[in-house]
């Protein structure tokens, strides 16, 4: 259960892993807001996230809104089936840009 | 015709603390698989129990010493019943409502998720007046 950030072609890739629940959501929120605060577009790699709930989703929504306010973009990549189910339930799959994998996300304009 | 009988599969009692939920989810995941639910239904059941317990952790013991959650897992021939009990002050069920999804803001989705993924979800005061009970049912469908 870690959060890792690295830079690829001027964009930030934020990798989350493990189960993102009420216990971990505050740390994930701070991590993502820190990424967004660097003033560059952020791709959040969710390929290693095995579980996410409403509190984890809330952290991502907050980061998305912070990116919008800062004039940058935040997108998601490699969303696991469980996480995608939760995004779809909340109809957030229409709000977030979701890429099938990280390579596609990095090749895309955002 | 009487309702189908259900047997108690497990009963867990644990502190209403966020750091215990990873253990609880693992137990619920195992119970759902043990009862023959497919992967997607199992994920839905785990999500619903996680959200129900999260509501207890966030609201039931607000401003008080952390109390327990009792999770009952019961199985019937064609269903799983999850019963989440807290021992906080009674909460008016009318105040437990999902929010409007068009309002894009962090939080407040747990009750909505429960209603979406479970076949039934009934919230009310405990019969003995010592807390609140959320009883959820998931019927077995085709394995998914």
Image (cartoon, coloured by chain):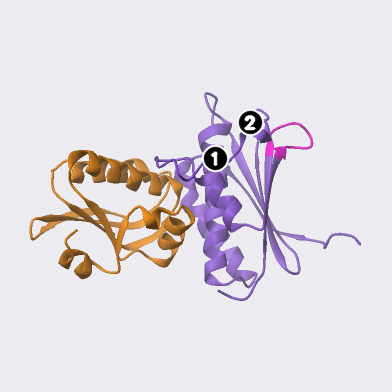
Chain colours: A orange, B purple
For mark 1, give the secondary structure.
Answer: helix
* Residue at (68% x, 30% y) in the render: B90
Disc 2/disc 1 C-alpha distance (Å): 12 Å
Relative placement, left or right, of A66 versus B92 is: left
Q: Position of residue A71 (x, y in %)?
A: 17, 43
Indicate which disc residue B88 carries: 2
Q: Position of residue B92 (x, y in %)?
A: 67, 31
Q: Tell me if residue A71 is in the magenta stretch.
A: no
Earlier residue among tags 2 and 1: 1
Relative placement, left or right, of B5 versus B122 is: right
What's drawn in magenta, residue-wise?
Answer: B124-132
Disc 2: CA contacts within 10 A as few (<14), some (14-19) or many (>=20): many
Indicate which disc residue B55 carries: 1
Q: Mark 2 vs mark 1: give the one in front.
A: 1
Query: Taking the image as drawn, is residue B114 in sight?
Result: yes
In the picture, the quarter occupied by the N terminus of chain A is bottom left
Q: Residue at the far top: name it.
A: B63
Q: Is residue A100 above or below residue A62?
A: below
| Residue A109 sits in quarter | bottom left
| Residue A104 sits in quarter | bottom left
Q: Is residue B111 above or below residue B129?
A: below
What chain letter is assigned to the residue under label 2?
B
């Amino acid at each position: 259960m870690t959060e890792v950030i690295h830079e690829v072609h001027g964009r930030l890739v934020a990798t989350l892993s493990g189960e993102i629940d009420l216990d971990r959501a505050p740390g994930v929120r701070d991590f993502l807001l820190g990424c967004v605060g660097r003033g560059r577009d952020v791709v959040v790699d969710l390929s290693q996230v095995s579980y996410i709930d409403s509190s984890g989703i809330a952290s991502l929504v907050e980061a998305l809104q912070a990116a919008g306010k800062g004039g940058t973009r935040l997108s998601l990549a490699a969303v696991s089936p469980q996480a995608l189910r939760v995004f779809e339930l909340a109809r957030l799959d229409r709000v977030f840009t979701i890429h099938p994998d990280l390579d596609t996300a990095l090749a895309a304009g955002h | 015709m009487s309702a189908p009988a259900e047997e108690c599969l497990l009963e867990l009692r644990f502190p209403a603390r966020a750091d215990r939920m990873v253990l609880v989810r693992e137990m619920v995941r195992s119970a759902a698989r043990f009862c023959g639910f497919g992967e997607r239904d199992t994920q839905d059941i785990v999500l619903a129990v996680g959200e129900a317990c999260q509501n207890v952790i966030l609201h039931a013991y607000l401003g008080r010493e952390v109390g327990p959650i009792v999770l009952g897992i019961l199985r019937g021939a064609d269903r799983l019943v999850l019963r989440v009990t807290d021992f906080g002050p009674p909460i008016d069920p009318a105040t437990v409502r999902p929010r409007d999804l068009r309002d894009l803001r962090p939080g407040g989705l747990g009750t909505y998720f429960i209603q979406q993924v479970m076949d039934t979800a009934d919230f009310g005061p405990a019969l003995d007046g010592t807390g609140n009970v959320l009883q959820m049912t998931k019927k077995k469908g085709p394995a998914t």
